Image (cartoon, coloured by chain):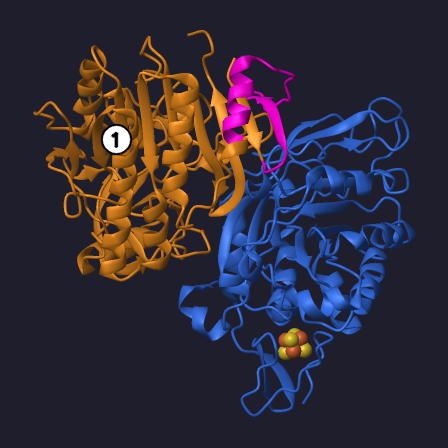
Amino acid sequence: MSLAIIDAREWQTVLDLRTGRKRADDSPAVRLAKRVLARHPFPGDTDARGNRWVTDTALDLVGEYDPQFVFLIYAQQFYLFRFSCPPAAERAAMIDAAFAEAERFANETGFCTVVVGTGDMIPTAGYIDLSGLDGLAVTSHWLTRYCGLYGLSGKDGDELRRLTASGLVARVAGKDELLSLFADVPAAAERLPDFLAVAREGYCFRSTLLRRPLMVPAGNEVIPVSAPLAGIKSITEISGQVRKLLADRKVALILLEGVGVKDFRLPHEPCANGRGWYSYEPGEAQYLTISTGSHQIFSYPPGYRSYREDGENKEYPFSGYFTSLPSGTLGQGFAGRSIAVGNRSMFMHTVPGADIAVECFARNLYNQGCMAVIHRQDK
Amino acid sequence: MKCNYCERRCELGDGNYGVCRMYREEGGAVRERFPRRWSTYAVSRIESLPFYHAYPGSRSMTIGTAGCNLECRYCANAFVAREDPAAVQDAMYDFTPAQLVRMAAKLGCHNIVFTVNEPTVSLPSLLELGAESRKAGMPLGCLTNAYATEEATDLLAEVFSFVNVSLKGLSRAFCRQYLGIPNAGPVLRNIKRLAATTHVEVTTPVIQSVNDGDIDPIAEFLADVGQGIPWHVFRLLPEYRMKYAAYPHIAAIDAALEKHRRTLPYIYFHNFVGSEWVNTLCPHCGATVIERFSLGCGGDRLDRYHCRGDACPECGYRIAIHGQRVAWNAKEGTE
Ligand code: SF4
């Protein structure tokens, strides 16, 4: 059973992650998680100390648990870029600071690092509003380059053709087109929209999030990877590389959000961030592809109607739209000890599959505190 | 001329749009500056808004406009409510009332709830929406600070069949310093007025050492309005101009609420993840009749609904529920 330990500042509680029900558990692992959470209150998604929190918490957890595999996400700059679009010099300084935090972790622990940038961000060129369609247009808050379309009318078809002709929409792909692009990937087609609209680079579809993004991920057909072994050509090859390295050393896989080939500060190789016309935006599908080594576009596809699965009795109530724990992840398949720490909320306990995950519990930038999840305490 | 929508009673005209900056004077009448302009249309669980005693389990479409008539120092939606409404118009959606109701149906929503800012600053558009949603049989609810005039409060009651009033504090010093109004008198008056005709829940955000002293008098006031009134006590997340304030102490607030749970059986203490004070207990036999999860600002959710209709499954006592329990996907695909 996976346990969730919530720290809402000066108050902690332990829950069963799957059912959300309170658990009385005072095992050594729970006590460890409580100690670490209490020592590291989360400063907030856009707070200048956000990335420092990741390193400090991870170092503490390394000291307490002695893992061989560490998964980290640094995302502070991603949130700041997204909602404030700082001037270029400030952005560069934030990226430098994110790399400095990753380096601090490596220097203090001696871990071998594989560092991945999840993609460059660029100022938003414009917004595409499909709320006037007869059918339904669904864009998630964080993946705004894609929009799921349902129940389109003939008039909607005309409007989409107009947007495509004007260049704002790069493509409108039918369900079959997406399925055939990833024909080798097992698909749960019922979550796929009838059509997927893809915005031109720099443009974003409007979601129902009140804050409009001021910067969005660039096209990012490739993302940068810095690793001791060369030859990573695709996002699906990263986890294999990490597994190889884990055979004889301690490894930290570090994701830097909002940083791509343009701004990467380490020697790196560009690797394909998707397939054909589809490239990943930073989010669960991209992280899971990195973690599992196979494309994960279909689990929770872009533009899917997540709200339909959000009702009463949903399992994993503290895991956002995840309705189950992903399988085949790096941590899950690793016999040694593993941890994950990051300021990217529920992705930390879902994507890496680490024994212990520590994450911020922030939603839409509102800071609720932190959560630790213990998946394994038998190692 | 004076605006009569809220107790600010602003003088409009000559480029003056009132404190909320949402109304103007035209030909001797008060007009909306930005009619039928909406800041969002999002799907939410009704428990997350929060309404714990109205249409449990239902899917709501939340909407808002821009602007507000109060000046709360801890506003969580300052980027919409505290900005000059003229400056955020390019981010607004244009929907006629019929289009908005249809959007709710397309999203499989059972009801529409105005949540983002203060409905009093957009009353004419909401009156139109009220007429349209009544035609469609779609219930309409709102969150309000209830600083409206008596006349506007009656209009709110006409438009909305379920309302959550934010009763933020009672002391004059608090009202002046934290809300920018002289006192809470109109809010108390309007809670009574609304409760006479409408389903009312009340929310009080507690700020440690600032308004926690108001817990006792607020509880007494609410018990006097009606013991069946649900009261949501929020652990305030410091935002906006109070971003660096301390997080309120959970155990201390819970202790302060404890003695009121006999007179006000539907007290909930939440707005923080993992809260253990979000279930409904039967006031008669103490059985747990509705279970919920608290995800803080991530939104609360219904876990299990044990009532039979609105009756306690153990003793049959009628729990104060507005409308029926609605299954989450009940309206999916009915548009
Ligand atoms: S509704 Fe706006 S304009 Fe009218 S009195 Fe209140 S603050 Fe002033």
Q: Colour of chain A?
A: orange
Ligand 1 lies in which image quarter?
bottom right
Please report the bounds of the magenta region as a residue range: A8-37
Task: Identify residue for label 1.
Answer: A107
Q: Quadrant of the C terminus of chain A?
A: top left
Which of the chains bears the disc numbered 1?
A
Decide which of A343, A176 is in the foreground and name it.
Answer: A343
Q: Is residue A11 left or right of residue B192?
A: left
Count of marks placed on residues: 1
| Quarter of the figure with residue B114 | bottom right
B36 on left or right of B326: left
Question: In terms of secondary structure, where does tag 1 sit?
Answer: helix
Check the rendered structure and report the hue given to chain B. blue
Q: Please state the horizontal and vertical placement of residue A157, each as a whole percent of the image.
A: 29, 51
Pointer 1: residues within 10 angstroms few (<14), some, or many (20+)? few
Residue at the spot x=60%, y=49% of the render? Answer: B237
Residue B178 included in the magenta stretch of the image: no
Residue that appears at 73% across and 52% down = B204
Q: Is residue B325 left or right of residue A196?
A: right
Q: Nearer the viewer, residue B104 or A43?
A: A43
**Residue B140 visible in the picture:** yes
Where is B290 relative to B225, above or below? above
